[in-house]
Image (cartoon, rainbow, N blue to C red):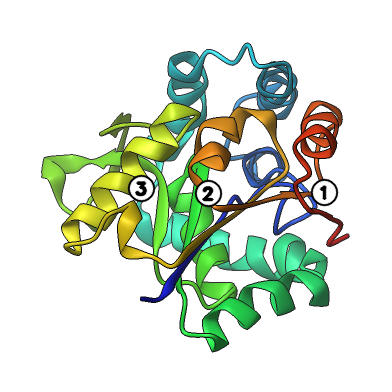
Amino acid sequence: MTELALFDLDHTLIPFDSSQEWGRYMMQQDMAPEGFAARLDQFQEDYVAGTLDMDAYLRYFAAPLANYSRTELDQWHERFMDAVVRPQITAEARQLVQQHLDAGHLCGIVTATIDFVTRPIAREFGVKHLLAITLETANGQEDGAYTGGWVGIPTFREGKVTRSEMWLQDMGLNWDSFAAIHFYSDSMNDLPLLRHASHPVATNPDARLKVLAEQEGWPIIQLF
């Protein structure tokens, strides 16, 4: 039996919220309406407080992407990776992921950020399995233009557990298929999936998760 290693992304493997940073980048490129980044900051505050309206957040975040072709968006995102993401990935974060990959563990990133923003970041870590919020495309084509909507179950709170189970089932696996299940997260929003892990790790934890981890005796690590 192999082991399963799951990672949250924002503030866990990277020291920032990728949707917020992408929003600021869109503002810099005149791709989004005035005040877009500030509104994303408010959504982030709601997320930390556990009061995020995911439906409202997704509608707001996805809308500007429908104004551009996938080719344009991919070109902008590659520049975003060079300017914002790659310089901030720490050696410690890369080493953490790599040690699980080298051990032959099944690795996945499970994030409540959209797939367009996070898929290139997952590739940067060498992780081919990404569970993220899936944006809707025209006619359901994988490379089609974005419509401003999304599909499926958002990978948020209990949705991270559900989507992980669906992903494993697609491979003919379940939680019992693994000798150990690791999950790294910074947020109390991820408590449902942390409870499913045999080895939960509070990673750069927020204040509430740090208190819980100390009570539960979970490891606490800092990657940045």
Residue 164's disc is 3
Residue closest to the eye, 73 or 112: 112
Q: Residues within 10 Å of mark 1 (few under 14, many from 20)?
A: many
Residue 204's disc is 1
The residue located at (75%, 60%) in the rendering is 84
* Residue type, mark 1 in image: Asn
* Residue type, mark 3 in image: Ser
Q: Residues within 10 Å of mark 3 (few under 14, many from 20)?
A: many
Number of numbered discs on residues: 3
Locate residue 222, reporting x and y percent: 86, 57
Q: Compare marks 3 and 2 and give the one earlier in the sequence.
A: 3
Element under disc 1: loop
- Alpha carbons under labels 3 and 2: distance apart: 12 Å
Decide: is 15 above or below 54: below
The residue located at (41%, 72%) in the rendering is 128
Decide: is 67 above or below 200: above
Element under disc 3: helix
